[in-house]
Amino acid sequence: MDSVLIIQSLISGIMMGMVYALLGVGFSLTWGVMHVIHISHAAFGLLGAYLAYSLLQYFGVDPVVSAAVSVPLLFLVACGVYQLLIRPITKAKEVIVASMILTFGLAIILENVMVLIWKADPRVLTPTYASGALIVGPFYFQYPHLVGFSLSIVGITAIYLFLKKTYTGMAVRAAWQQPEATQLYGVNLYRISMITFALAVSTAGAGGISLALLNSFEPHSHNLWLIYLFLVVIVGGVGNVIGTAMAGLIIGVITGLSMAFLPYQWVNLVTFGLLMIFLIFRPHGLFKQGV
Amino acid sequence: MKGKRMKGFSLLMTIAVLCGLMLTVPAAAIGAGKPIVIGGSLPLTGEFAETGQWIERGMRFWAEGINAKGGLLGRPVEFKIYDDQSNVGKAVTFAEKAITVDKVDLLFGGYPGTAARAVMPVAEKHKVVYVSMGGHMKSFQQGYTYSFGAPPLMGEWWYEGFFQWLATIPANQRPKRAAVYTINNPVGLALQDSIDRWTKKLNIQVAINEKYNSPLADATSMIVKAKQMNCDIIFANGFFPDGVTTMKAAKALDYNPKAIVQGVGSVVPAWIKELGADGDFVFSGTSLYNKLNYPGNDKLNAYVKTKYNLDGYPLYFGFGYAWMQTIEQAVTGAKSLDQTKIRDWLKTHKVDTIAGPMTFDKKGLPAPINFCTQIINGKVELIWPKNIRTKEPVYPKPAWKK
């Protein structure tokens, strides 16, 4: 087996895996902290991709720069969505089931809004570097992969530092571990949940932009992205930021190696076979659950 | 007496006024009886929504025209269109519903091939004529008698025109080694048929022949392999998303084969719009083309220019229109809505469509179609057959512009 092919496949796989990790980290947080399985998470990511597309098409704004607009915008939108839709269902007896049904509906609404605004046509994010590559010896580091990978590293590190180093972040972690005790210390759980939810949705926006740099997208693409979200979260452990990042890397490595060694028609089988194995033998994931 | 005369006079006046009114009423309204309902489903949302919406637009444009001319058999036509959300199961359910619950007068063709293929046995079971793209050759080999492809979308014929053209290139200038990457579904597998036949005939070695399952997240390793094995022609037998992923990887990795042949993704308007110059010089096939010199194409092109500011109608707009043209001629020819009479008429008569004249064989198929297209300067050009060529093909493909 050719070593160039193996290493090149690994490079692409790892970079792609990290993009899935960025998209998945917020999904993992809402699931872990709030027990909300946010099915419309990927649809918000897609919204970020569409915003980047429009900003590029009409104002020539680079997708990375557009993240500076879409991330705060999605944060605000998510605060509203939390207050209107998510907060009421946190009182439900079965929050997980209720949240899945509710956010499934929200995903359908978002998809149709995107069809109305951007039509059903497929779109491609094509900044000037869309098809370029950094060549190092015999290896090609495609610029969109590099940009997506860098965004992922920045996004995941920012979330990690927020959780570890800020008061609000520590409150989020405390709320995950001991919600009642956290409330006794005067922490407003609803406020913490709203920040967690909004933060998660904003990272989805950045993840959506990263993924859109690699593949074309359409209003229904979030359904496909959602599968990868489940994959990284289940492999990485619910609510675990570092676990999600590691899961992204592992999935990337496995996908890359599968593409180098196996017939292509087996690649998805191996990737999703991995999901099934984890669900059966290690449903809590590779890493400890929790933020 | 006077009263009786007045009554008689009033009656005469009423009749005269009514006659006068009838003269002023358009012919269409005279024949306007109960509308003819044409039903079925299209993927108006979901994965194939863009295509489904163009088919609907083409059908509605046909309906506008036929209603303005006085309708079909003197009756206006109207559609009952369900959105199957790009779901084959729903397409079958809606076909059943249209036939058995709505009791529509006619059934229209669906999309994609997987949906059409699943609806064909439903049409056969209920003995209802079904004019559509079909689901490639296998779907027409099931012995159905009520299904027609007018025109069909046949993967088996898709690259026929490309290879016929390639055969005209001097042997020493033809590609020597091919990389074939095929999406693992009925469309992709159907595309392989002509590749297998023609690569042997033209002495092109198939160095890579691999299938992949959708979604194709990354094409880097595919391109690396093709490059390493010196493949000077690549067949990317897939849809729009995998086509885009492959093209982006080919450019990023500076892979410059003599020819890139792409499945069904490169003939949708989004290919040119979204990829720009990077989408140029890609070869593909088609069963219909907006610059064909058959009656009706000019009218359709003028309409999409006014309505959508497009230079030439999109392929699936044409498909929707052509299928309805076929139904129109069959109903008019059979002078009836009796499905068996319509079927029998189609089996024995020629229809004239924007895709050309067609007669159907036992399977419900016209003679093989062998159009080859190439994207040149952001336009889909017809390069084969030679007698209807709109532009000289660009070969070998120029290197990527960095």
Image (spheres, rainbow, N blue to C red):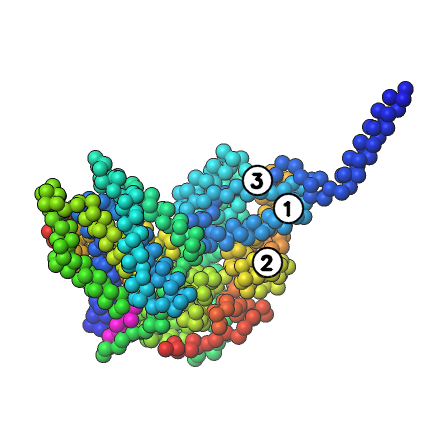
Q: Observer-nearest residue: B31 or B7? A: B7
Label located before the other in sequence (1 or 2): 1
Element at badge 3?
A: strand
Q: Which residues are magenta?
A: A139-144
> Separation of disc 2 and disc 3 at Cα?
24 Å
> Separation of disc 1 and disc 2 at Cα?
16 Å
Same chain? Circles 2 and 3: yes
Q: Is residue A285 magenta?
A: no
Residue B303 circle label: 2
List the single residue furthest toward the top. B1
According to the picture, the residue beneath numbered tag 1 turns out to be B67
Amino acid type of the residue tagged 1 in the rendering: Asn
Q: Quadrant of residue B92?
A: top left
Q: Are marks 2 and 3 in contact (CB under 8 Å)?
A: no
Q: Quadrant of residue B9?
A: top right
Q: Observer-nearest residue: B221 or A64? A: A64
Relative height, residue A220 to residue B227 (above, below): above
Q: Observer-nearest residue: B97 or B10? A: B10
